[in-house]
Amino acid sequence: MSWGTELWDQFDNLEKHTQWGIDVLEKYIKFVKERTEIELSYAKQLRNLSKKYQPKKNSKEEEEYRYTSTRAFLATLNEMNDYAGQHEVISENMTSLITAELTRYVQELKQERKSHFHDGRKAQQHIETCWKQLEASKRRFERDCKEADRAQQYFEKMDADINVTKADVEKARQQAQLRHQMAEDSKAEYSSTLQKFNSEQHEHYYTHIPNIFQKIQEMEERRIVRIGESMKTFAKVDRQVIPIIGKCLDEITKAAESVDHKNDSQMVIEAFKSGFEPPGDVDFEDFTQPMKRTVSESSLSNSRGDGKSEPKFGSKSKGKLWPFIKKNKGAGPEDFSNLPPEQRRKKLQQKVDELNRDIQKEMDSRDALTKMKDVYIKNPQMGDAASVDHRLAELGQNIEKLRLEVQKFEGWLAEVEGRLPARSEQPRRQSGVYEAQNPSGVNSCAQDRESPDGSYTEEQSQETEMKVPATDFDDEFDDEEPLPTIGTCKALYTFEGQNEGTISVAEGEMLYVIEEDKGDGWTRIRRNEDEEGYVPTSYVEVYLDKNAKDVHKPLQKISE
């Protein structure tokens, strides 16, 4: 099967077919190029998608990624980034192995095709020239034969005419011989030209054209093979990344399988556990007891004369509900004393770690500058050693400040971790936020007291809402018997009771306990019959004793 023998007369069709083959190859190159652009665009979109949902550094989102479910999602985002990278690899490999190679091959193919068809046209022109020479020789032979016949006929006519002179007859005879000789020469030339043309034509159709067409056939077959190999490469490039993409998907599956709902639930507990116990039962307050007493005129007159009432400490029902009441928002104190014990400990530990990292950065900077200074001292041409002294001094001061901060926060941390009293679940520095709270001018004790998590309520308490102007009936309660003592306590820390309903104590002072902590973090104490109020339970060490000392006998202050 050869184009040279089978298609010897289809020069023009072969020229069109080979041009079509090049067009197909260029179309395939364009297809692959657009595929690579799609892969790059897809990879870019995947990367942008992964970046969009990545947690922002130093943000609340970053803290949320400690749960197993969110960590699995983060692993998925990272794997999608790698997944996008594989599509970039597909694009790069297709560009280098297919697009670039085929583009170069198309240029070579066009040059080769041009050369082959140029040779074919040259051979075609040569055979056409030979054919024209043959035709010219043939026409000349034909013309000479006709002229020889006419010359012979003229000679015979002259020879038969008796009126013609002998000289004219001889002249006609010579002319006839000359024409006959010219015809013979033309015949010989035509025969030679014909033989030459036949030889050239045989050579053209059986040697030159077959060779040229064979080369064109081989060129076209190479093009077909090349485009087939490119298609295989197209599939191979995709197949090469399948194992890596499979690993990405396996990692996503592995991350999904690592999701632990129990662990996440435990982390929620660790994140939000306050360390407090639930509030106790609300005591029944029997307001009918004072009504049974006979109101004396002296008490009524005294109450009118005084015109003021003492704070009531009996009602604590509102305080029991503080953990569920809306809290005021705002910046908390530096020692996080507005937080429950567990949360405060975590915050202090995080602060200590953060300060230690800052110290390490400053020390690394100082070490680097110290080395630079040594280099400047050894090689003065590189720089002035004195130029870094100011910066070294600044770094030293910064490090010292940070160390002082670390000591301060470590002290608070030690206070939380190691110096808690027996009731370790109660907050130690609950009252610290009193210094920063907004005074409200409400006379209710429950309104001004702190909630167990260290924050304050925005709503007025029930006692405040039901408050009425002081009357003689209100003053009747001032004559009630004071609450009996149920034990003693020692102040572990100094507490400044700046809010109504609280009482100030000094460290080491001994006082009477007249009401236990009911779960809200406060204990009611008495110094003498005229001074009583609430202090944070974590600030005192309580000694319950049913046979406590009389309320009128003050206790002595002792030092630790």
Image: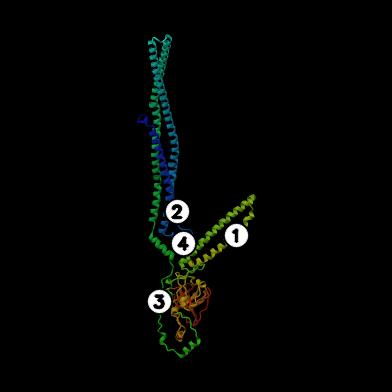
Question: Cα distance, mark 1 to mark 4?
Answer: 32 Å
Badges 2 and 1: C-beta atoms under 8 Å apart?
A: no
Which residue is denoted by mark 3 in the rendering?
282
Percent of width and height locating residue 248: 40, 51
Percent of width and height locating residue 522: 46, 74
Earlier-in-chain disc, 1 versus 4: 4
Say what amino acid the circle numbered 4 marks.
Lys
In this view, the mark in front (3 or 4): 4
| Residue 90 seen in the current view | no
In this view, the mark in front (2 or 1): 2
Say what amino acid the circle numbered 3 marks.
Val
Which residue is denoted by mark 4 in the rendering?
60
Vertical position of residue 431 compared to residue 245: above or below:
below
| Residue 402 seen in the current view | yes
Which residue is denoted by mark 1 in the rendering?
394
Question: Cα distance, mark 3 to mark 4?
Answer: 38 Å
Question: Cα distance, mark 2 to mark 1?
Answer: 42 Å
Q: Bin the neighbour count of mark 1 within 10 Å (Cα to Cα): few under 14, some 14-19, many 20 and up.
A: some
User: What is the secondary structure assignment of the residue under circle 4?
Assistant: helix
Question: Cα distance, mark 4 to mark 2?
Answer: 21 Å
Q: Nearer the viewer, residue 421 or 11?
A: 11
